[in-house]
Amino acid sequence: MSIFDPDSKNRLPSAPFTFQSTLNPTDVDEIAYPQSTKFYKKDEGSFDAESYLTVSSTGDAVVEQNVAINNYQKIHLNPLFMYDGDINWSESNQTLGAKFNPSSVNGLMCYVFGKEPKEKAEKVGEEMIHQDIQLYMCSLNDLMDDRRSFMEATRVDRKDIIRTIKLSNIYSDYSNLISKRIRRLEGMKSKDDISDKIYSELDTFQDIFSVWELCRIIYIPSKQEYNQFGQFSHELLKWINHCFPLPDEFFWSRLYKLILRGSSQAKTYLESIIKDGGAEFSDHIKLVLDILDSRPRTTELEYHEFNLRRHEWLSKISDLQTKLRGEGFLEGKINKILMILRGHTKTITDECSTWQEALGGLVYHRRPTCDVQELENILNVILKEKKTCNTALDDALIQFIFRKVEKGIQHCERIDLWLSAHLSDILNKLDLVGRINSQSSHQKKKFNITTQPDVDIREYCLLNYAESMVSHTTLWQLAFKYFEHCEICGYSYISQLVVRIPFEDEYKANKLLSICKHNGLTLQEKTISRRYASAIVYFINAGDTASLEVIYRMFLDYYIDTGKLTFLDTIESIQLDDASPVSIKFLSRYRLFHALKQNGEIQRAGAILMELLRAQVAPISFWPVLLLNALPLLQEGKARKMIIFSTQDTLEILRNLQDVTSFVYQDECLACIERLKKWHTQENGYSELDKNLTALRLALLQNSADCYIENSSSPWMFE
């Protein structure tokens, strides 16, 4: 994970503690080495990205490529490389190796390796190859932070979308968000200091909108549009005019294009000819204006009536063409307008600058009642006359018109991963996309991938899009929402990536743990928890009691909400002494209490519990938990005929129980009990909880009676 610009707001903050990966760098494919011998500068955590060398094996041949990385100068590692001492790495024997991330189409996994100095070698005079077990991640894609709100607004929050009008509504919502994004970027163009990146972003969103709207017209018509003939040509012409604005051209060329696009501005241009040209042009121009005004419209007529009116209208055009013969200059100019209105293929294609413009002109003027199925034949005619630019946009649009949805979506990946992900998600609900192999053919060759599960193109695109957000400071959460909607590979991605997200505070750690819990990732949950051990040691050494208190409270809250001791396992690896913070020692003793109870050493466990209660270290919100921990000890002691708590201990527990259920602490107690009820159920082996902790009171009273009976038989009672 990385952000290229060192000053970028997207750059992940470095945490003072990082997990140690159990992955072996040999598990990833395609080794790559930066070419510079002094690429890594102290305290930057980055390497130069002017070029790096990739090596891929094809049989016995080795192919070397120089790869440019979006013209950025730096690639930043996450987590940052931590120096063991005041040593400039560029002057040492270490270097950086990188391999392509097997779960990524645009990321690297990096690691440190090199020869140990002779003085550190086991045998004098030898140098040992050393490889750091820490893996670093970086992405070769940069993500604009300004796009964050847009991406959050379009997050995946549903698994199934029924094929009804709701699908059109969702598609329309996305379309509106794209339009808002375009308007915002266009507004930013008025600023004096605007980067080329903004212009590039605007171009990208305009391409996104072009593809998005074409797919709406072709694949997702509303019920009204199904029943209205000629609606398709009307929508297609609107798409042309909105997504491909007219360029600046000379008067007559622009007039022809306005006529071709069905623009109302054409009448203004014709009226200006009458005004500037005098009487010799006025009569003929007025006839052209009359023809434009009398054009039959599909939205106003029934099908048969429209065809009859259109036939009469075309006859008027032929009559005017006859009148214009011999008029010289005027004949040629106006006749070209009339040829466009008649739908003459050659005239339309010659006057169009792009194939999209020609497509709209032929549909509107030659086949105004055509449907989607006819569009493919019309485009074939155009492509014989007009050349395409072979851009990602052109290729995607053409494939969608030919109804080759999978190929169209693959070209959308070249435009933007957001587009391919959300478009495939929508079209998948219409059963318009099939299954492909999870890696395209060029990626198989590049990454030497031979065995990958087959996924539908929707999941493939969602995975790629989600992974592009993993390195972002806030959007990483959305990435996991998308992963959760990938039925085949999503779980695997979550399990691999969730432990690689660095967390600098308990708030982010809780989010990571929630992801683990939601997806049943127990091992990853423990891995994240163990990372807190490094944090605790760091804060202890730094004397940061405030941070330790935050971690301490988080551990307690986690137990209240889940009943799990995952966090407390991290305490085992920390060496504590008398000078250690009381909060951390409390956690250590509480973990020992549970270990003793689990091992059946209930008397020792009872002694530890009383020690914790008397210490008064735990916050009021945790008192009900400590008190309830006494209940299973009392019950097991009763079954084994053992006295766990003395009379004095029992009275102290009762006194604490009275405190937490009294008016003073009642709210904290009730809130804690409600949280405990989520997992403290009879199905899980616990007794029912109530606000008065009745079961605990009864057990304590019974224990008092047992203590009295046992003590009453002792000799001192009769002295």
Image (spheres, grey):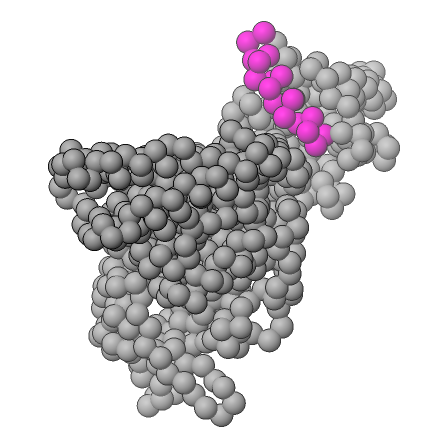
Residue 297, placed above or below residue 375: above
* Circle count: 0
Using residue 229 as the reference point, say whether residue 310 is left or right of it. Answer: left
Q: Position of residue 224 (x, y in %)?
A: 59, 32
Residue occupying the point 45% across, 39% down: 313
Residue occupying the point 41% across, 54% down: 344
- Quadrant where the N terminus sits is bottom left
Towards the viewer: 492 or 549: 492
Using residue 346 as the reference point, say whether residue 169 is left or right of it. Answer: right
Residue 549, placed above or below residue 56: above
User: Which of the 4 image quadrants contains residue 112?
Assistant: bottom left
Magenta residues span 663-680
User: Which of the 4 image quadrants contains residue 556?
Assistant: top right
Q: Main secondary structure of the magenta part?
A: helix
Residue occupying the point 41% across, 81% down: 55
Within the magenta stretch, is there residue 590? no
Residue occupying the point 31% across, 66% down: 69
Towards the viewer: 461 or 245: 245
Res. 462 visible in picture: no
Towards the viewer: 78 or 548: 78
Q: Position of residue 261 (x, y in %)?
A: 36, 44
Q: Position of residue 122 (x, y in %)?
A: 40, 83
